[in-house]
Image: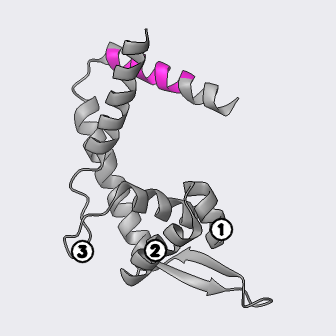
């Protein structure tokens, strides 16, 4: 059983990697999965740096480095709060939103190409398993 679980875990990581292959920015630089997840989270939450670091389970200096990279690419901005200039939120720029949308479509397309190779019964089984796993993780 443990060997089968190890195989499943490895396959899940491989699927994640395949879904994000060939993700390039406008300068043909690789756009990482971490950058993608970060951009999505920032778009949803407009977090403080500490909130971002906590979400990503990384240290604050690593989060700062990641944000610096995204900021240099004009994908995010740092916004000081009006009431307390020491409080800085991170927000996605218009360019960041367009890039995020483009990469989401690319990832969905990559996954669709692979999933379309499954027959209807296999697709239904996979959907059922993923739904069950999602419900388990939400409990």
The residue depicted at 55 percent of the width and 66 percent of the height is 43
Residue 47 visible (yes or no)? no
* Numbered mark located on residue 50 in the image: 1
The structure residue drawn at horizontal position 33% and vertical position 54%, both measured from the top left corner, is 105
Q: Earlier in the sequence, mark 3 or mark 2?
A: 3
- Is tag 1's residue or tag 2's residue first in the polypeptide sequence? 1
Distance in Å between CA atoms under marks 3 and 2: 20 Å
Query: Can you give x and y, in whole percent of width and height, for residue 14 in the image?
Result: 29, 36
Give how far across and how far down residue 107 sits, in percent. Answer: 32, 49
Residue shown at the point (60%, 56%) measured from the top left: 55
Res. 85 visible in picture: yes
Q: Residues within 10 Å of mark 3 (few under 14, many from 20)?
A: few
Using the numbered discs, state the Cα–Cα distance from disc 3 to disc 1 in whole angstroms: 29 Å
Residue toward you, 115 or 22: 22
Residue 26 figure quarter: bottom left
Quadrant of the image for the C terminus? top right
- Which residue is more in the foreground, 14 or 92? 14
Task: Give percent across and percent down for residue 121.
Answer: 34, 13
Q: Position of residue 109 (x, y in %)?
A: 27, 46
State whether residue 48 is above or below residue 119. below
Disc 1 element: helix
The residue singled out by tag 2 in the image is 65
Q: Which residues are magenta?
A: 122-132
User: What residue sits right under mark 3 in the picture?
Assistant: 26
Neighbourhood count class around disc 1 (C-alpha, 10 Å): few under 14, some 14–19, many 20 upward: some
């Amino acid at each position: 059983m443990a060997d089968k679980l190890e195989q499943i875990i490895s396959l899940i990581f491989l699927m994640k990697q395949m879904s994000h292959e060939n993700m390039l920015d406008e300068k043909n630089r690789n756009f990482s999965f971490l950058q993608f997840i970060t951009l999505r989270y920032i778009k949803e939450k407009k977090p403080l740096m500490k909130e971002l670091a906590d979400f990503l389970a990384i240290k604050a200096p690593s989060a700062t480095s990641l944000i610096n990279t995204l900021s240099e690419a004009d994908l995010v901005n740092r916004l000081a709060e009006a009431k307390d200039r020491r409080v800085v939120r991170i927000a996605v720029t218009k360019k960041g939103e367009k890039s995020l949308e483009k990469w989401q479509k690319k990832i969905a397309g990559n996954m669709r190409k692979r999933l379309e190779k499954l027959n209807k019964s296999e697709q239904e089984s996979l959907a059922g398993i993923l739904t069950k796993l999602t419900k388990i993780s939400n409990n």
